Image: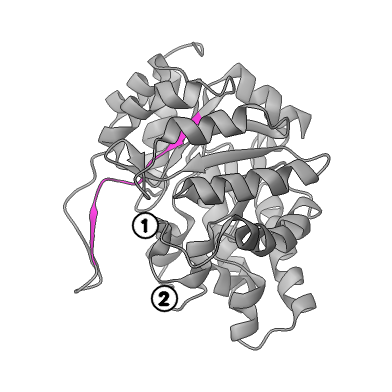
Amino acid sequence: MADFARALAEGGLVLDGGLATELEAQGHDLSDALWSARLLADDPDAVVAAHRAFYAAGAQVATTASYQASFAGFAATGLARDEAAALMRRSVWLADRAREGMASPDSLFVAASVGPYGAALADGSEYTGAYDLDVRGLRAFHRPRLEVLAEAGADVLAVETIPCLAEVEAVLEELSRLDGIPAWLSLTCAGGRTRRGEDPAEAFAMAAGVEGVVAVGVNCTAPEEVTDLLPAAATAGKPVLVYPNSGEGWDARTRSWTGASALTGGQVADWLDAGASAVGGCCRVGPADIAAVAEALSASGPPR
C-alpha cells in the first residue's frame, strides 16, 4: 500500500481505461442494472481477461469491477448480504489475479472501485448529483461497502465519479473512519463545475485535510475540460490524477455513442505539464487508448 503512494509521488503513473468498455468489446451485454458487476458472478474469467488487456497495454493500475456493486443492487437480484460482500471481495481478487504472469507484477496495483450512489441507482443520477439522500444517508449507503473493500486487500480505494459536494463530504467522513488503506477521490465535472453545478475547488479543499486520501482528480469528464480543472485539484496539496472519458456523447434515446474520441497524446503531455501524476481513461477508453497514453507518458520524459 505504501508502494502505491510512492508511485504516485514519483509521477508518470498509467491508470487503466473503461473496464466496461473492454468487457463490451469482448461481447458481453452489460445493459442490466449491475453493469460490469454482474460478471463477478456470471463470468469472472472475463473480468480477469479485461484487466490483463489493460495491464498488457501499459496500465499500472487495474480498477476493479465494483463500481456499480452495492448491497441494495445485489439484493435486488436475490443475493444475500454475505453473498454480495463475497462478490465485492472477489472483484479485488480478480484484479490481483490478473497481474500474475505480467512483467514486473510488483509494480502493478489494484484499485478497488467505489462508485457514487447514483451508479447503484442505475438511473444516470451520478451525472446530475440530484439525489434523494442527504449527507447522513449517503454515509450510511457508502459505509458497508467501503468497509468490505477496505478489508479485501486492494492497494488503494478508488472513490470515483463523485458528482456533488454532499457526496464528497459523506465519503470523506467515512474514509476518515478507515485505517490502513489509502484512497483517491475523483470528481466528474462538466463546464468547469461538479455535475451538480458546484465549485470543484470546494471538494478538493475538503479532501486536503483527510490523511488517508493520497490523491485527488477528475474522471468521466470530457478530455478538453481536464486542463482547466487541474489548478483546483492541485490546491488539495496531493498528487493529481486524471482519467477522462473519450469525449464521445451518449444518446439515451438510441442507447448508442455518438461522435469520435477526443483523447490525444498531446493532451496527456499537457496534463503532465500542468502537474498530473497519473493519467488513464474512463468510459469508451480501451486498451489501445491506454497504450497511447503510456507512450505519451514515456515520450514526455521523467515526471515533472
Q: Badge 1 is on which residue? A: 128
- Establish if 16 lies above or below 206: below
Q: Number of callouts in the render? A: 2
Q: Give the residue type that dot 1 points to.
A: Thr
Q: Nearer the viewer, residue 152 or 137?
A: 137
Which quadrant, please, contains the N terminus?
top right
Label 1 secondary element: loop
Q: Nearer the viewer, residue 79 or 173?
A: 173
| Structure colour scheme | one colour
* Disc marking residue 5: none
Quadrant hosting residue 254: bottom left
**Residue ID at (42%, 56%):** 129
Magenta stretch bounds: 241-251
Coordinates of residue 127 in the picture (x, y in percent) = 37, 56
Coordinates of residue 188 in the picture (x, y in percent) = 41, 45
**Label 1 crowd (10 A; few <14 / some 14-19 / many >=20):** some
Q: Badge 2 is on which residue? A: 29
Residue 181 within the magenta-colored segment of the rendering: no
Label 2 secondary element: loop
Give the left or right position of residue 3, taking residue 232 as reference.
right
Give the left or right position of residue 174, taking residue 60 as reference.
right
Coordinates of residue 247 in the picture (x, y in percent) = 26, 46
How far is mark 1 from mark 2, CA to CA?
25 Å
